[in-house]
Amino acid sequence: MHDIVSDAISPQLEQLRAEVDVSLDRYTEFSDDCPEKLRLAMRYSLLAPGKRLRPCLVLLASEACGQHHAPALPAACAVEMVHAYSLIHDDLPAMDDDDIRRGQPTCHKQFDEATAILAGDALLALAFQVIAQDLPSPITAVRCLHELALTAGACSLVGGQMADLTAEFSNLDAEDLAAIHRRKTGAMFRVSLRLGGIIAEAPAEHIDALDTYGEKLGLAFQITDDLLDVDGDEAAVGKRVGKDADQGKLTYPGLLGVAESRKRAATLVGEACDVIGNLGESATPLNHLARFVLARNQ
């Protein structure tokens, strides 16, 4: 998936992203006996330029539920670590076989395949370590660990990648494609928002609203991602134009056409903003972020 920095990013999102970057840098400056090549590979992928959209969702969800975002920073970093791990592994020759990620060589191209696999493994483990050691409440930490483990597991993120691989060159429809991305992009968006709500000790109805917002926003994000793959050029998106379609991977423009894909993304963003209306003014930044996601195809 494309994950480049945009000039359209809001000042608030830019500030949150900067805070996340500082924390990610700190978490990967190991003081123990981590092999240097492994440390470099982990930092190479984790600290690569990006919007840090998923960790920002953690922080914005916490604020939308009435708490300052600072206590949620460890969970935000953990989400980004899981995301980075998944990208490293998805890019491997046995998976999506990508050479470029975020405008630079993928981890296995920059280092080697074995190092990339181990860097992904280490980032996944570090994510759970960070939540366990740095969330202030043990009860909250256990809830967050459970949520993140479910999202990273066989029935969600990993299962989604398996389904994605088996769907190549298959005769599936848009609903089948949506089901795959609910396990991948959608699941990571949803857990990001749920973690923010849990850390803010939000009531169940608010967490449920954030969950639905995340599901709809995640699908809209994936549609705009597919549109970028069709419309963008290599310099703009850091990826060969139409590469997914050329490899037989299902895309929304390939199934629905460009115009219908844009329409569906806009509808999803509108629905996402509507569902968090009961959170009041504190949810305004989440509305802005949803519009920002939609603007990625323009």
Image (cartoon, rainbow, N blue to C red):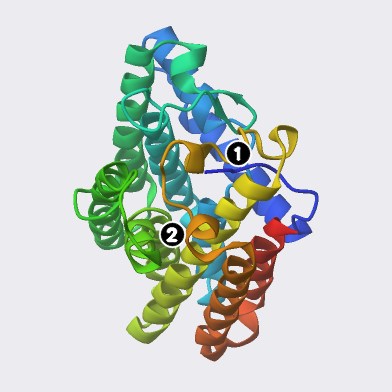
Q: Residues within 10 Å of mark 1 (few under 14, many from 20)?
A: some
The image quadrant of residue 198 is: bottom left
Q: Which amino acid type is shown beneath numbered disc 1?
A: Asp
The residue most toward the bottom is 278
The residue lying toward the viewer, choosing from 147 and 265, is: 265
The residue most toward the left is 154
Work out whether 174 lies above or below 202: above
Mark yes or no: residue 297 visible.
yes
Which residue is disc 1 drawn over? 21
Q: Position of residue 240 (x, y in %)?
A: 61, 32
The residue lying toward the viewer, choosing from 237 and 107, is: 237
Residue depicted at 39% across the width and 77% down the height: 207
Q: Which amino acid type is shown beneath numbered disc 2?
A: Ser
Q: Residues within 10 Å of mark 2 (few under 14, many from 20)?
A: many
Foreground label between 2 and 1: 2
Label 2: which secondary element? helix
Label 1: which secondary element? helix
Which residue is disc 2 drawn over? 192
7 sits left or right of 188 in the view: right
Residue depicted at 64% across the width and 68% down the height: 259
